[in-house]
Image (spheres, grey):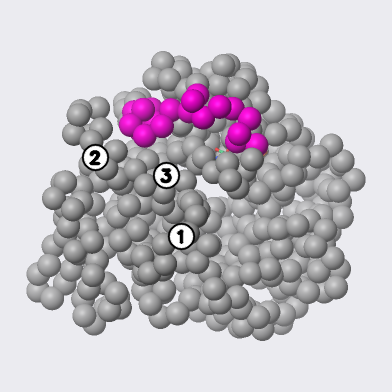
Amino acid sequence: MTQTDVALLRKYNVPGPRYTSYPTVPYWDRTPTEAEWIDRVANAVASDTTGAGAALYLHIPFCRSLCTYCGCNMRVTRNHGLVMPYVQSLVKEYSLYLQRLGRDRLAVGEIHLGGGTPTFLHPEELDALLEGLMSRSTVTKDASLSIEVDPRTTTHEQLVVLQRHGFNRISLGVQDFDPRVQDIVNRLQSEEQVRTVTEDARALGFRSVNFDLIYGLPLQTLDSITATMDAVVRLKPDRIAFYAYAHVPWIKPSQRRFTEADLPEGDAKRALYELGRARLEAAGYVEIGMDHFALATDDLVIAARQGRLHRNFMGYTPAFSRPLLGLGVSSIGDAGDAFAQNEKNLQQYEERIAKDELPIQRGHLLDAEDVVLRGHILDLMTGLETRWTAEERYTPFLDSVPARLAEMQKDGLLDVIQQHGETRIHVAPAGRAFLRNVCMAFDARLIRKAPATQLFSSTV
Ligand SMILES: C[S@@+](CC[C@H](N)C(=O)[O-])C[C@H]1O[C@@H](n2cnc3c(N)ncnc32)[C@H](O)[C@@H]1O
Ligand code: SF4
């Protein structure tokens, strides 16, 4: 990296959201009642004129052991007795939605099992869960059915069950291949384990394999990232999420189990990303949005080129399925103009399901300004560009955005083009590293009320 790059990284490295939603979760302040939420969900179902169908996200919170960097909503347990009651609650929650919507089945274009660790479930438990979902859904022709798996706990029998239910995408938690890094974060897993699951999934017909990797973990160096990327390129997944390590020890105390002195930070952390990106691009991968890569033939790259890329709580997707129903503890649903998050506590979640209630704990009804700003932030996160006029995609808050971006424009990170009554923001290649900062200029809620304590990880 040049000295200018380093100076820019230092200048713009501030705490900031990752914008999987707008407004971001800490700023939600208008929780819908169950009736309001169902009303918004029903509208989203009715407005699906393209037949894309709804998306279902199912959260499986259980993990066998703790990876100390983990920022996910998860629960380490050896008590397998928790699983079947939870599976039954998930299926019942989906039935409650159908009942409230007055339907027997729902058209579904996307299903994602995330966690925690969905492969904590034994094959027969997975089968019961998927049977419960599929018997109440009409899956669209090109549906994307995906699961996050931990290669240390994934068996051939589980993959067979998934394949039998039509699952076609799989995402492996890899993180890093360096034994020293794996040791300090308590996650030992060999290249061989990752290769076995990858090859098994491909042989069974899964059409896309994703690897999750993280940069900024303790003890990572340029050499260790080089070795990790060499192994990744050998295994050639179709997609790669190369996440910035989110260090939030005030929320996740287990991140205090390694010393902060071992964490590469600021420009040292970004140098790891730049090196990884160069290795991946040399191997034929294309960078997408923020932190993501895919082979040039992958749907995600094609969708990005055609301006169809979408981003939701599950990451980047080529399909625009709505509503998103979040089932299970802590899951978030999205109806376009409303969000709803479920109870985070397993017992409370199950108790509410047992009482035939939708287990909504909090959420947000978007106002007109939220909806407009959400559209701009989404366009920036997916296509690195957005535009508006006084008549279209406009809200008065936007008048202040160009002044807020002037400094970044001066630094060559983006262009603000104002002509023929239209304002267009275009993020330059050098600005991609600061996409979160660009979005922050549109974040009216953050600007009006800066957090009193640190809520977000650093933008770099
Ligand atoms: C639910 S896990 C994936 C499935 C499975 N639990 C596993 O780890 O193999 C989701 C992903 O979140 C990412 N992740 C977890 N904690 C993170 C953190 N603190 N910062 C950035 N990414 C994180 C990891 O890449 C992880 O693979
Ligand atoms: S990274 Fe995955 S396996 Fe590790 S603790 Fe988090 S959710 Fe569980």
The percent position of residue 455, horizontal first and vertical second, equals: 50, 53
Mark 1 close to ligand 1, CB under 8 Å: no
- Tell me the magenta residue range: 254-273
Residue under label 1, please give it: 451
How far apart are labels 3 and 1 at the CA level? Answer: 14 Å
Residue under label 3, please give it: 458
How far apart are labels 2 and 1 at the CA level? Answer: 24 Å
Which residue shows up at 58% across the image and 45% down it?
250
Name the mark on residue 61. Answer: none
- Count of numbered badges drawn on the protein: 3
Instruction: Tell which tag, 2 or 1, sits nearer the viewer.
Output: 1
Asked if the stretch drawn in magenta spans residue 267, the answer is yes
How far apart are labels 2 and 3 at the CA level? Answer: 14 Å
Count neighbours of disc 2 (C-alpha within 10 A) and say few if under 14, some if 14 to 19, many if 20 or more.
Answer: some
- The quarter in which the C terminus is drawn is top left
Query: Which amino acid lies under the numbered mark 2 shown in the image of this protein?
Result: Leu
- Of all residues shown, which one is farthest toward the front? 452
Count neighbours of disc 3 (C-alpha within 10 A) and say few if under 14, some if 14 to 19, many if 20 or more.
Answer: many
The percent position of residue 218, horizontal first and vertical second, equals: 52, 26
The percent position of residue 88, horizontal first and vertical second, equals: 84, 59
Residue 311 found in image quarter = bottom left
SS state under label 3? loop
CB-based contact (under 8 Å), mark 2 and mark 3? no
Asked if the stretch drawn in magenta spans residue 120, the answer is no
Residue under label 2, please give it: 8
Does residue 163 appear anywhere in the picture?
no
Query: Which amino acid lies under the numbered mark 3 shown in the image of this protein?
Result: Ser
Mark 2 or mark 1, earlier in chain: 2
